[in-house]
Image (spheres, helix red, strand yellow):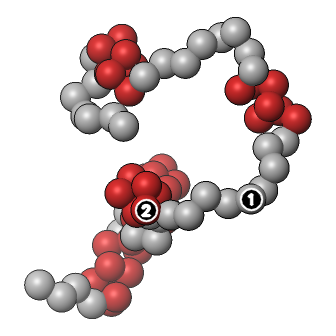
Amino acid sequence: MAISNDDIFKLINILPEEARQTAYDFLKSLTICNIRPDWYEIEQMEPDDIPLSDEELRQLNSDAGFVTGEEAKREFGLQVDLP
């Protein structure tokens, strides 16, 4: 079902003022989701040759440890599969 821009604009125009920021954030996230690669696409990409920043090196070499997706899922009770 195709929805016209006019129909979308009509809905936005009748939104209460306090809901406009939420609507804006949601619409913005939809536009970003459609251009960002998913995990499979990221996995297929060639690695870049950009050196790590000092902060990235510090984090990589820290003793804070690494949390796997499964550990995070268990700890936070997430209902999604993490890589």
Q: Residue at position x 36%, y 37% from top?
A: 83
Give the percent coordinates (x, y) of residue 82: 33, 35
> What is the secondary structure assignment of the residue under circle 2?
helix
Q: Residue at position x 22%, y 28% from top?
A: 79
Determine which residue is flagged by label 2: 44
- Residue 70's quadrant in the figure? top left
For the residue marked with disc 2, what is the amino acid?
Gln
Please state which of residues 52 and 14 is positioned toward the viewer in this rendering.
52
Mark 1: few/some/many CA within 10 Å (<14, 14-19, 20+):
few
Q: Residue at position x 78%, y 56% from top?
A: 50
Give the percent coordinates (x, y) of residue 63: 70, 9
For the residue marked with disc 1, what is the amino acid?
Asp
Mark 2: few/some/many CA within 10 Å (<14, 14-19, 20+):
few
Of the numbered discs 2 and 1, the one sitting upstream in the chain is: 2
Please state which of residues 29 and 24 is positioned toward the viewer in this rendering.
29
Determine which residue is flagged by label 1: 49
Contact between labelled residues 1 and 2, with CB atoms less than 8 Å apart: no
